[in-house]
Amino acid sequence: MGAIAVIGAGPTGTCLVERILANAPELLGHTVLDLHVVDPHPHGPGAVRQAERLDLLWAESAAADITLYTDGSVRCEGPIRPGPSLAEWLGCDPGHFAPRPALSRYLSDVFERAVRAAPGNVRVHVHREEATGLAELPGRQRVELAGGRWLEADAVILAQGRQGVLPTPEEDAQLAFAVRHNLLYLPTGHPADLSLDELPAGRPVLMRGAGLAFFDLMVLLTTGRGGRFTRSQDGEPVYRPSGAEPLLHVGSRRGVPFHARTGYRLAGPTPGPPRFLTPGALPAETAELRELIAKELAYAYYRELFTAHPSRTRLEPAAFLDAFAAAAWGGRQMRALVTKAVPRFADRLHLDRLERPLRGMRFGDSAGLQRWMHGYLAADLERRADAAYSADLAMIHGLFAVHDALPEAARDPWFQRLSGFLAGGPPGPRLAELRALARAGVVTFLGADLRIEQEERAGAWRATSPTVPGSVEARALVEARLPAPSVDRSTDPLIAGLYARGEIRDASGLPDVWPADGRLLGQDGVPHPRRFAMGRWAVSGFARPHADAPLLRHADMLARTVLAQTAAAGRRAAA
């Protein structure tokens, strides 16, 4: 008899449970297994996507791009167990962005379906409690639960996904300033978990951040307070305020929101593994690594442009791509090649301008910036809905390929920010709503390189940007960003305890693991024989169908590793 404990039953933990149960008949033989699944939140949705969240918030991806089931594209040793995507399960349009409660019901169904299909020699035990500690026993692990009980297991897999974190020193300083002056400060957190009721109607609120967290907050503070959208004669959304909305002043490092999600599929083939970046030949210098990443993305972009839209190019695809591969990134030879082969300026990839569109721009007043932002948002919506620009989507697939193949690249903050900006943005309709809110005067853009200072005399925060002259003062400040993962500031008692004892170490905010098999690494760099974690895949979200999803491949590998180890231990005990 053996036992495995999975800590966390959100999307990542559910994926692991499904893979363990799918692989059990092959690897367990007749060994009896107790599979313990520990999470105080609903099993399937987990903490962040609970069904109690408002219908106003949507899933982050289109319904056709969400699954936790394997299909024929997944390169894994375990059995393929197909299942419906969210779109198929709902019976909705593939491009539909489902409300969060619908996503929660889907995830619950995935979990329940996996448990119902468990083989007869696997007993699944669901524990609606928090795991608070992990301790050594002779040949086993003890998982301590919040209620005072504990479980024993041969192996433990950490799959908690995103966890709560303590405030940063900067957030502590802002909280102290807010207390001194009776201001309102909301540090980083998951938007649906924040207390927004105290944000005043009709008063300025500074919003630092323009990614997905901002869009959720935007919804909760507008339509969530009784506002509504109607349609103009040309089909554009028009916002009708309720009068209960705060006045949102939005700024960030870039000064523009994340790009909208694309509303089409690739015309050409999906980019394969990285061509210029290989695990055995990574440059030691960060600058060189970033240049090669940029070249990978540009190669994926131009490959799609030349193969899917040849009428807009002047060279044969093979000739261009060979010459591009041979040229140094950003050098004179590459620039001349692109100018000669891609006649339209709009078809050329300018990654630096794409990444920082407001860099070097200055406006005479805020009104000028607002006009520019309206045009920028309109152009982004048009381009992300037009398959004629499918090279943009190919570049995003190139991002995914780099992230999958190179853990070193995925840990680079520059690469993380670029990935979120280009590929992790809101649905197109949300960006259209943002434009409508700006036209209604509910949202005002502050510009790039936002700086927020504490004004002790005024008892308020002051926001400035080099993009425009002047400043905005407010008595409320919201960090409109998700908290960065952190092992040393985690509020998860199990993670915090392991870190305090030196039994795990930090890897870009996540528990570090041995890449070959997912074993947890202690601060001495030694892998633990019975403790595992999903590592960076624990915050991967979902898998895309028919895309050889890394989340599914990694979960299958980890499930097989732990099952084989547990079965071997059971056979030794029986002997």
Image: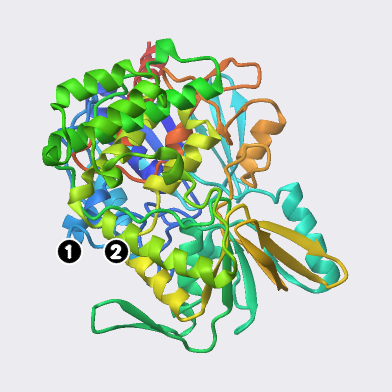
Query: Can you identify the residue that label 1 sits on?
Result: 92
Please tell me which residue is depicted at 56% across the width and 57% down the height of the picture: 209
**Amino acid beneath label 2:** Ala
Q: Residue at x 73, y 66 (%)?
A: 462
User: In front: 126, or 72?
Assistant: 72
Name the residue at the bottom extreme: 243
Crowd class of label 1 (few under 14; some 14 to 19; many from 20; radius 10 Å): some
Marker disc for residue 98: 2
Q: Which amino acid does label 1 sit on?
A: Cys
Q: Quadrant where the C terminus lies?
A: top left
Query: Which residue is drawn at the image coordinates 27% and 36% (left, top)?
Result: 301
Relative to 128, is 323 above or below?
A: above
Percent coordinates x, y for residue 437 in the rendering: 45, 76
Name the residue at the right extreme.
Answer: 457
Task: Give percent across and percent down for residue 199.
Answer: 63, 76
Left or right of 237 in this view: 311: left
